Amino acid sequence: MRTLAFASVLCLACHAAQSSSSGLSVGSATEPPRPPAATTEVETTGAEATTSGTTSAATTEAVTSSTSASATTAAVKFDLGAQPDLGVPVGCQGGDLEFSFIWIANSPEGTVSKIDTKTRTEVGRYRTGPEPGPDPSRTSVNLRGDVAVVNRAGSITKIAARSADCVDHDGSGTIETSSGAGNVLPWGQDECVVWNTPLRFASRPAAWTSGTPTIDGDGCMTHVEPEVWTSAPDALGNATVYLLRGVDGTIVGSTTLPGVDGGFGVYGGAVDANNDFWGAAWSTGPLVRVRHDDLSHEIIAVPDPKQSFFTVYGFTVDHAGRAWVGGQGSLQRYDPSTASWTSVALPPEYTSLSRGMQEDAHGHLWVAALPQGILRVDTDSASFVELIDATTLVNLKYPAGISVDVDGQVWMVDTDANGAHVLDPETHAVEFVGGMVGPYTYSDMTGWALKNVVGTPEG
């Protein structure tokens, strides 16, 4: 079993107006206070980071701000609001998954769908924020199956996957929660929605850490106290990366990445085996890394092999800790061990924008290719394997995101088809799961990526 990380993320965006964020209110819970956070600003040029710079205590505030940057294109839709788990018991079960869900954001509806990947049925749908239009996009799933959903209007929300982790706010003795699309509870009434933390407007990525490895009472290795990374632009041409406590959403640290903007700050993100945060700024970069231990960072220029406006769109980190960046007709890999870039030699017929992507257990990277379908490449050799198009993906309309489920099936979210194509990588059999509303998620929707960060448990 591989032991390094590969999480997926990314999307394309174009907010140009300010949206307000209200304070947290989930049932009887209120927004937790934010303690002083150590903010390390260490700018690097080139591939190797330096750790000069100082660490100072400063109170981190999540505030609403406007951004004047916007981007337009006739070729693709951006992730505008108007556009449209995996529980991994890492004790002594040898890494087998206890259950599997995929969490897909219904962006224009302001909800996220929880879908059982084995039965292909929706088992819950949740409001994702207090705003009138929270505009959810990125989702990230931790090792208990809980999801963190980032709202582009400016907040991040945690939803528990297991009823035992939900909170009986009204003391009724019953957990009141959604069972599907037919009963979405109003904001503050679903007791599986655990917390919401305000962020700045146009916030984007989410990436859970694996938590701290520990040995439980049965002598089995498990992981506790996971945290979650997120980021937002500061409206001054910089990005702020936040680290939040998973249990209550408290911001425990942040760092500013100077000049990392593109209108949306860090556009997509993932973690590696060290729980360091990796991300890239739309649409020309740079690639960034923020270290979990001290919040020091490095900033790395992204080559432009196609001389395209879309050099950066899709993003993930593979099993060897290598960052992958998708662009218009391009796919590139950055290896931090050699500080070098490799460009995949794609066939001339590949003209798509490489969007959401994720690697499977066999070292194959699956990429949502707009508009052609699904691209498959080998991660170790950085070589093209195949392009799966509309002849296989019937009713293909607008590829957005990719995630791999517990059974190795590849889910490709299709925004305009209001659902997801589920591909068997061996047989190429496809099932379509519908009933969603303008789904626009292309991050780690199942937790598969994070499971591969942990690797084979001990015990």
Image (cartoon, rainbow, N blue to C red):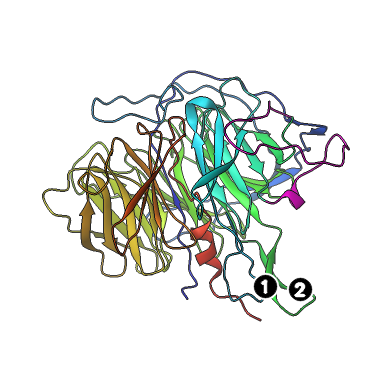
The part of the image, by quadrant, that contains residue 423 is bottom left
Q: Determine which residue is flagged by label 2.
A: 216
Q: Nearer the viewer, residue 243 or 147?
A: 147
For the magenta stretch, what is the residue range? 162-188
- How far from the left and from the top, in percent, is residue 8? 44, 52
Q: Would residue 442 be found to the left or right of residue 332 on screen?
A: right
Instruction: Decide which of 207, 54 is in the foreground and name it.
Output: 207
- Image coordinates of residue 145 in percent, x first then y, are 62, 54
| Residue in view at x 65 percent, y 49 percent | 161
Residues at marks 2 and 1 touching, judged by CB atoms closer than 8 Å: yes
Q: In the depicted view, which residue is nearer to us: 421 or 370?
A: 421
Residue 215, position as x, y percentages in the image: 73, 75
Q: SS of the residue at dot 1?
A: loop
Judged from the image, the secondary structure of the residue bearing numbered disc 2 is loop
Q: Quickly name the residue at label 1.
A: 91
Amino acid at the residue labelled 1: Gly
In the depicted view, which residue is nearer to us: 110 or 225?
110
Using the rendered view, name the quadrant where residue 133 is placed: top right
- Is 163 within the magenta? yes
